[in-house]
Amino acid sequence: MKGATLTGRYTEAYNEVMRILIVEDEKKIANFIERGLKEQRYAVDVAMDGEKGSFLADINPYDLIILDVMLPGMDGFSLCRDIRKKKLDVPILMLTAKDKVIDKVRGFEGGADDYLTKPFAFEELLARVGVLLRRRNAALPSVLKVGDLEIDQLKHSVKRGGKEITLTGKEYALIEYLARNAGHVVTRTMISEHVWNEDFDSFSNVVDVYINHLRNKVDKAAKKPLIHSIRGTGYVLKE
């Protein structure tokens, strides 16, 4: 692989609330991609074979899947077709050493959205990831509004009553996720799976801690709270 050093040229493409699944059986490559994407503040899960990739794709709401072709058991082409048969609306980036035109055509016909051959520069991978995610979210408004709360998804800025609120990366990811689901209850498990990753312990109190941080920054100085607790279930962002 080339380009192991990140220059940050494409850091504007990241969105910490985005969750990516990597299905790759070469551990060195999987770790390399995982580390690089986490540095760009994506939540990342890794599967080392097609069956595990299929299982994770079924149970988790991913924003993008990076899929190797030559996998043990179920190969990448089969997994891609399986995902499309299940009507899972998630962008798929095929990543493989197979560089013949017929292989690329097979991938696209199976439902892949993009195709990158090995060896690859990480910057190019990151750029393609950013393009696919922007395309997926093109229909969403760039600014989310709940009451007098405004969340600019392009600038990653948050304002309430016209005053800008300074948030950490995780705090921003959390408030954006709540805003995208405004009016709907999201459970602690849903939050942990989308804002963190597969290995996160959803039974810990980290989600509650971050919710309290947000309340102190978003609700404390306001007349009406927007972040509400639903006893025994989770949280909802609403007026």
Image (cartoon, rainbow, N blue to C red):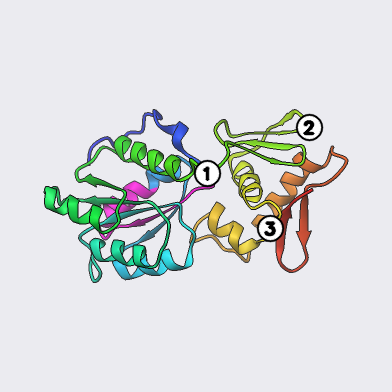
Separation of disc 1 and disc 2 at Cα?
24 Å
Give the residue type at disc 1. Answer: Glu
- At a point 20% along the width and 60% down the height, the residue shown is 70
x and y percentages locating residue 239 in the rendered image: 79, 48
Q: Within 10 Å of the Cα at label 3, are there few (<14), some (14-19), or many (20+) other Cα atoms?
A: few
Note whether residue 49 is visible. Answer: no
Left or right: where 106 falls relative to 197: left
The stretch of residues the image draws in magenta is 17-34
Give the residue type at disc 2. Answer: Gly
Left or right: where 161 falls relative to 72: right
Residue 27 lies in magenta, yes or no?
A: yes
Q: Which mark is residue 16?
A: 1
Q: Quadrant of residue 194?
A: bottom right
**51, above or below 2, in the image:** below
x and y percentages locating residue 221 in the rendered image: 84, 37
Between 230 and 147, the one lying in front of the other is 147
Q: Within 10 Å of the Cα at label 1, are there few (<14), some (14-19), or many (20+) other Cα atoms?
A: many
According to the picture, the residue beneath numbered tag 3 turns out to be 184
Q: Secondary structure at mark 3?
A: loop
- At a point 23% along the width and 68% down the height, the residue shown is 72
